[in-house]
Image: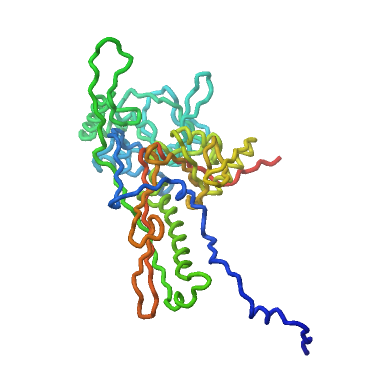
Amino acid sequence: MTLPELTALGLPAARALATTTKTPPQNQSRTPRWLLRTLPWVEVAGATYRVNRRRTYTVGDDLITCTLAGGRYQVIAPDLRELRALRGADDDVLQELAAAFVQEEFAAGETIAAFGNPIDRLSVLAHGQAVTERTGEYGDRVVLDVLGDGAPLGSDVLLDASAIWEFTATAETACTVLSLSRTELDRILDRSPALAQQLSQVREADRAARGKYSKRGEASIDLASGHAGEPVLPGTFADYDLSPREYELAVAQTVVRVHTRVSDLYNTPMNQLDQQLRLAVEALRERQESDLLNDPDYGLLHNVDPTQRLRSGTDRPTPDDLDRLLARRRKTRFFLAHPRTIAQFGHECNARGIYPATAEFEGKTVRTWRDVPLLPSDKIPISAAGSSTILAMRVGEADEGVVALRSTGLPDEYSPGVNVRLTGIDDQAIASYLVSAYHSAAVLVPDALGSLTVSVQPRKETAR
């Protein structure tokens, strides 16, 4: 078969003489990195940032871990130290207490504890979800909190035999509860004088410290107001935390290797080394945001105070849940959540006929709730069970909020907090560049950061 004879210059031949217009290397892994853009960066000299606070008397008050073996739950004995009354107790005593817990099952809707009744047991919610509530001024139901796995109930029984339930706890789902009865506790106290003495000391310390600390647990500052005449004014001082937390800068690093022949000969129209470094720094910035959220030491998801951790009353993120989260702090700057969580929140709003407003934030149009921006970050994980977290935070040193930490003015600095250093050229003429990003994050006071645990599973539609 013969090809038809061309009457004009063909396209393949013409392209050999043409100039190609090229783009820089594109990066589909880049995200908006809202956390890096919105957190105020604080300059850290000496690579260490110390957070000084007023002295706090409240300790413990965290979750108690339970394990499941052979269909039965069991309290992890050392975790009982999360209860303030048991902090410092001997391991043997804690083991005896943990072994005395009895498993109980509650169906959804059943009452776990009733308001006004004597507290006759210490309970731990091993599995499930429960709500605590009280009757409002006009007989309405007022939800106080939503409890999840590990939440203790009735810890006052350790210090006060006459304590009563100040709320009603109701199982929201099927719940497994581990309970230590008052009778069994008394038996253990009879056999353990050391535990009885410790509880007595905590009781006396509470009585002596009454009025000496604020509702936030901080050492009080004595004041006088509304007086007449010439009363003697109280003397006072602001006590400081004796063991303030220190944050050291962490580092994310990589080594970029470029053949010298490439950087010598193939730099037009784009510099090869510049493009390699740009992409490496982009990847480090993504890692920075991930570390600021997920690092087990300084990551924000791991540094939410127990008193600021909330759970959704319906599992799904609802307007009511975000209102509860918002009410826990002043001057909330933004919410941060996985994009799927924000989408699920939108679905819940639509189901209620609510349409959240949008606003311009940092030059972008974002969805808001109560005028607080809802910012997306895919670095917040979604568990295999479909649960995720919404963070709410106040930011900045001036507002005692959350801050990001870095050190600038580094040798061979590429951008603030990031430097690039030539480490040498090997025998194969390959140049190596060490790229380092230094960072950390700090929560200045506990209520600066709050979290809401939600499910991002789609709503189940009922058949019509």
Q: Which residue is found at the position 73% from the left and 82% from the top?
A: 9
Q: Position of residue 374 (x, y in %)?
A: 53, 43
In-front residue for pair 150/72:
150
Relative to residue 64, is residue 276 depicted above or below?
A: below
Query: Foreground residue, 42 or 96?
Result: 42
* Residue 447 placement: quadrant: top left
Horizontal and vertical percent position of residue 423: 34, 70
Above or below — where is 10 with respect to 407? Answer: below
Q: Quadrant of residue 148?
A: top left
Q: Residue furthest top?
A: 229
Could you say which is closer to the camera, residue 42 or residue 336? Answer: 42
Q: Examine the rendering and report whether any part of residue 325 can be seen.
A: yes
Residue at image x 25%, y 11%?
A: 230
Quarter of the rendering containing residue 204: top left
**Rendered location of residue 220, percent (x, y):** 29, 27
Residue shown at 59% from the left, 40% from the top: 358
Say which quadrant the C terminus sits in.
top right
Spot occupied by residue 82 in the image (x, y as percentages of width and height):
32, 39
Q: Is residue 206 above or below residue 300?
A: above
Q: Is residue 444 above or below residue 204?
A: below
